[in-house]
């Protein structure tokens, strides 16, 4: 068996005229995230981790923000297409471990729903999806409540 690991990172700034989507789940908040798609920072980091593990470049290469087909797209679609691309190359998901970095909103009440949603989209067991949330103790752009970032690691296998 061959295994590979990929790392993903993404960041988006807050925008008051947008909905907040994290891990495919709409989160009640006073602002959403700014981006070409729905700006789901968690899914974008996961896509980058998966694509990187398979040496398939990154989310911007595969789903460019210069293509209007991706304007305001639901990032769950991007994740599904990423999984389809990996499977077409013979890869299977081992697991995902991801961290959302946000001073606000508090995400603990939504973590299990996010895990379940992502597992459904990726067609894997919920125990293969670990999602955590943390703050930066009011430091940096996330601490100043300017945006949200996310980190992800993916294990894939053949």
Image (cartoon, rainbow, N blue to C red):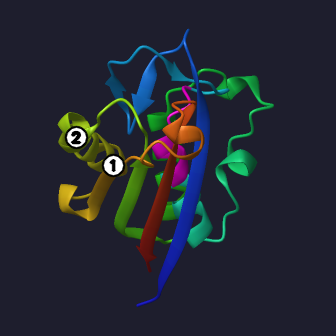
Q: How many marks?
A: 2
* Whether residue 123 can be seen here: no
- Secondary element under disc 1, as helix, strand or loop, is strand
Q: Which comes sooner in the sequence, label 1 or label 2?
A: 2
Q: State the image coordinates of residue 17 (x, y, percent, origin top left).
A: 56, 9
Q: Nearer the viewer, residue 101 or 98?
A: 101
CB under 8 Å between callouts 1 and 2?
Answer: yes
Q: Residues within 10 Å of mark 2 (few under 14, many from 20)?
A: few
From the viewer's perspective, tell me whether residue 138 is left or right of residue 23. Answer: right
- Picture disc at residue 133: 1
Residue 15: mark in rendering: none
Residue bearing the label numbered 2: 108
Circle 2: element type: helix
Q: x, y (%) of residue 111?
A: 24, 43
Image quarter of the C terminus: bottom left
Which residue is at a point 53% across and 14% down the rendered structure image?
A: 18
Dominant secondary structure of the residues highlighted in magenta in the image: helix
Q: Is residue 48 above or below residue 158?
A: above
Region rendered in magenta: 38-45
x then y, percent, for residue 2: 46, 88
Q: Where is residue 155 in the image (x, y as percent from the top left)?
A: 42, 73
- Pointer 1: residues within 10 angstroms few (<14), some, or many (20+)? some
Q: Which residue lies furthest to the right in this view?
A: 66
């Amino acid at each position: 068996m061959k295994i590979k690991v990929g790392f993903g990172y993404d960041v988006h700034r807050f925008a008051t005229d947008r909905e907040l989507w994290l891990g495919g789940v709409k989160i009640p908040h006073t602002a959403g995230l700014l981006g070409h798609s729905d700006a789901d920072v968690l899914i974008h980091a996961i896509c980058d981790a998966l694509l990187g593990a398979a040496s398939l470049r990154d989310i911007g290469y595969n789903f460019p923000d210069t293509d209007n087909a991706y304007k305001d797209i639901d990032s769950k679609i991007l994740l599904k297409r990423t999984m389809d691309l990996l499977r077409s190359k013979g890869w299977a998901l081992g697991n995902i471990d991801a961290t959302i970095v946000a001073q606000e909103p508090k995400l603990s009440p939504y973590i299990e729903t996010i895990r379940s949603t992502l597992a459904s989209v990726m067609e894997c067991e919920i125990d293969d999806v670990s999602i955590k949330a943390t703050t930066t103790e009011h430091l940096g752009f996330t601490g100043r409540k300017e945006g949200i970032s996310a980190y992800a690691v993916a294990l894939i296998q053949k």
